[in-house]
Amino acid sequence: MEIIDNIPVSLDTESVVSALKLSKRNPFIEKTVAELLEKTESTARPKVLYSVSYLEEKNDDSVRIEGVLFKSRVLRKNLENTERVFPYIVTAGTELEKIEPDHENYMKVFCFDAIKELVLEHALSYMEQVITETYALANTAHMNPGSLSDWPISEQRLLFSLFGDVESLIGVRLTERFLMDPIKSVSGIYFPTEVDFKSCMLCKRHPCVKRRAQYDPEMARKYR
């Protein structure tokens, strides 16, 4: 089990404004973002928790990893040719939750939410770089509980069980509905692969602001 809690955070106003997807530039918003970034860079401490885990069993629509049985036909198919995977939990950190913009200032809340999302994305990219370089991986992909109906969010509890007391380790806890707190957190299984895979390729949901790839009907047929 590995914890990474020294992730450098360096964001600029331009990248945050771009993430907001505004139709035109707004000096007031840019000033708001700049002010929030000052607080963020001195406060943010994103964290990564991951482990090197091994598959113990492969069934038709499930896999057993370190004694924990995960039920997902898609996950099972993705892990067909690998025996080693990297379960992970990444969070923007509890520290950012202490920064409380005026909740009546909806634009400031909107901007700060975008900043926290970028901190999370940066931490996830940092983890991917560490894993690929440390374990000499080439092509990789990941899956997250709840990203597809085939792997329900309730399995988040099983993923957390691989790490023990996650809250004491990196400050992330599961709610009764299997959501993570802080909300700017993500969990999943990272794995080596020979094909380009993103869960979005199997999902017809539209529109989706977090879509990372177009729905691929041919790939969807392969996973049935």
Image (tube, rainbow, N blue to C red):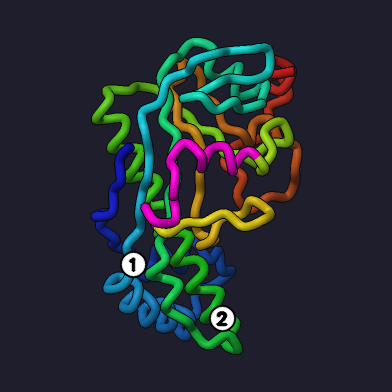
User: The residue under label 1 is which amino acid type?
Assistant: Ala
Identify the residue under disc 1: 44
Residue drawn 27% across the image and 73% down it: 42
Task: Find residue 77 and report its horizontal and vertical position in percent.
Answer: 60, 16
Task: Find residue 55 and report its horizontal and vertical position in percent.
Answer: 47, 18
Looking at the image, is mark 2 or mark 1 nearer the viewer?
1
Residue drawn 68% across the image and 50% down it: 208
Identify the residue under disc 2: 107
User: The residue under label 2 is which amino acid type?
Assistant: Met
Give the secondary structure at mark 2.
helix
Give the secondary structure at mark 1.
loop
The residue range painted magenta reads: 155-170
Task: Residue 223: name its quadrant.
Answer: top right
- Residue 152 is a magenta residue: no
Q: Residues within 10 Å of mark 1 (few under 14, many from 20)?
A: many
In the rendered image, the quadrant that contains the N terminus is top left
Task: Find residue 26 and report its horizontal and vertical position in percent.
Answer: 50, 79
Residue drawn 59% across the image and 43% down it: 157
Q: Is residue 129 above or below residue 8?
A: above
Q: Is residue 61 above or below residue 112?
A: above
> Image check: 104 left or right of 45?
right
Of the numbered discs 2 and 1, the one sitting upstream in the chain is: 1
Magenta stretch, overall SS: helix
